[in-house]
Image (tube, rainbow, N blue to C red):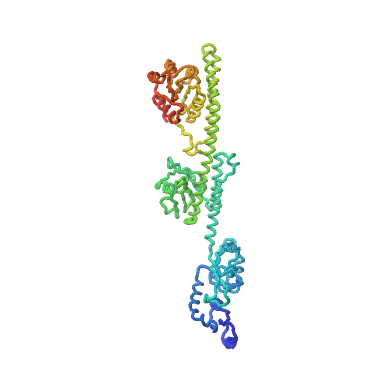
Amino acid sequence: MVSGGGEGAAPLNEALRERFEIIEAEDLLRGLSQLSQQPFAGVFLAAAHLDEATKIGQLLENQRILQNMPDGVVVLDADNRIVLHNAKMAQWCRAENLVGENFYSVLSDPEILGPDYCPFHTALSSGAESTSTLRVGENQYLQLHVAPILPGDGATKGPSSPRQLIVAIRDVTTEYLQQQKLAAIHRAGIELSDMSPEDLLNMSVDERVELLKSNILHFTKDLLNFDVVEIRMLDVDTGRLDPLLTVGMEPEAANRELFAKTQGYGVTGFVAATGKSYLCEDTVEDPLYLTGASGAKSSLTVPLILHDAVVGTFNVESTEPRAFRESDLQFLEIFSRDVAVALNTLELLSAEKASTTVQSIEAIHTAVALPIDDILNEAVSVMERYIGHEPKVVERLERILRNARDIKQVIQKVGQSMTPSEAVPEGLQTRQHSFLLSRRILVVDDDESVRSAAHALLERYGCIVETAHDGVEALSMIRAISSMGTYDVVIADIRLPDMNGYELLLKLKEMDEMPPLVLMTGFGYDPGHSIVKARQAGLKEVLYKPFRLDQLLETVERVLASSGAVKQP
């Protein structure tokens, strides 16, 4: 009975009670709530509710719809007590009848996460809709959409301000946990290559790589919950996929040679070749799959992509068929992008460290090069005076020459050992030209800046450079090195303090084994026409100062080629 009160209803109530069990409701919404809880023989509406009688069928139909909705729906009064609820709400609360109960109490006093921390009060006081999120227990998240039931809605009558609320409750646990996981993956990606200045200073390249691998493995297991992991890096030149990190794979699979090709190299080769992720739901049925982990029934492989280019692959496997879902694919793709960035950052840091080391070694080498050349020049000059007279003195001077030359070689070797090529991207490595490697070059010029530049430019490419101040020193150096062969190239200025370039050429022609000669000149007047005379005497090459690096290398290459001295790479 929806009576609505009034003195006229009392006699009728008494008469009906003699024959029926009467359940009274103050308004139509409470009446609908009672109808949803238990069966009734009939419904009595007082005169005050006659205008709503025409809508009773529609309201009952709406009630049936509410009972079958996948989301929870409740109607609350101003004290947050439940007036009406559907079956989904009762299911969440593990109770059949929630009418009259406090909304928050039936949900075990959940934590309000916002954005509105008083959604019911907001809707009642403002007459506007409100939203908020609740955390129920440890791992359930409910999203509330609260709307006031305003006068004229057809369900209640009363003053102008709303007295009741309708609340739609949606379980967003999956979406909320996914957002939390995405945020955690993002934080993990930042931490992958996060190193303090002390770490960068104290850790070697190999130690940094091991730290990164340890971080990747930690987040892969603890955050993504993958136990079998294989990461391979793509060698762009060969197309080979080299193992970087392998956990849980069979030794044969871990050591298997794979290439970035769509056929013959399994899922990993396919992913590296196409740049597309691949979800293998059943390894038995998938023809692309090659055995990886023992007993694996499914796998998930994504490319490592940096600047729209594939740089490697990230593969995980499970002993359960169809163990991976689309969400796992999304998580792994996001994490793999962070892995690619971290590997690139590590490579850049290693390259920077290697470049700094190279610069330091070159600075040391340049600083000692000219003083060592002076030692060589003085030792050779003294040695020529004792040749044929004091064999022991000559022998000791030769030892001094060898030791002086060894100093430069030791510095070069130390520099090479401190800058491992694998830590430096190809574009930053000093390219070793096979035609210059280990070639002995004598540079003759009284200008110290020219001699220093020759050391800096040519030794960068593996040359062994020695210098002399004038023609006499140059001839002494050439004679003294005869026991080791001769210089592969002699580069001399056309105007030396004691002779010109043409005169030096004639002196060289008198030797049993003449080294190839290149003359240097500035863009000035050649009063003695030494270049013209030298060309007539057989000179092939001339360099113009200040020489460019490419011009210097090309000239030396041509000289070595014409003399038949180019080594085969």
Q: Measured from the top left, where is residue 413 in percent x and y?
A: 53, 30
Can the viewer see residue 513 in this picture? no
Going by the picture, which residue comes out furthest to the top? Answer: 389
Residue at (48, 37) in percent of width and height: 428
The relative height of residue 155 versus residue 8 in the rendered view (above or below) is above
Q: Measured from the top left, where is residue 439 in percent x and y?
A: 46, 26
Figure quadrant of residue 372: top right
Q: Quadrant of the C terminus?
A: top left
The relative height of residue 179 versus residue 510 in the rendered view (above or below) is below
Between residues 112 and 497, which one lies in front from this camera angle?
497
Q: Quadrant of the N terminus?
A: bottom right
Figure quadrant of residue 208: top right
Between residues 389 and 97, which one lies in front from this camera angle?
389
Q: How many marks?
A: 0
Q: Measured from the top left, where is residue 513 in percent x and y?
A: 43, 18
Can the viewer see residue 223 in this picture? yes
Q: Measured from the top left, where is residue 501 in percent x and y?
A: 44, 19
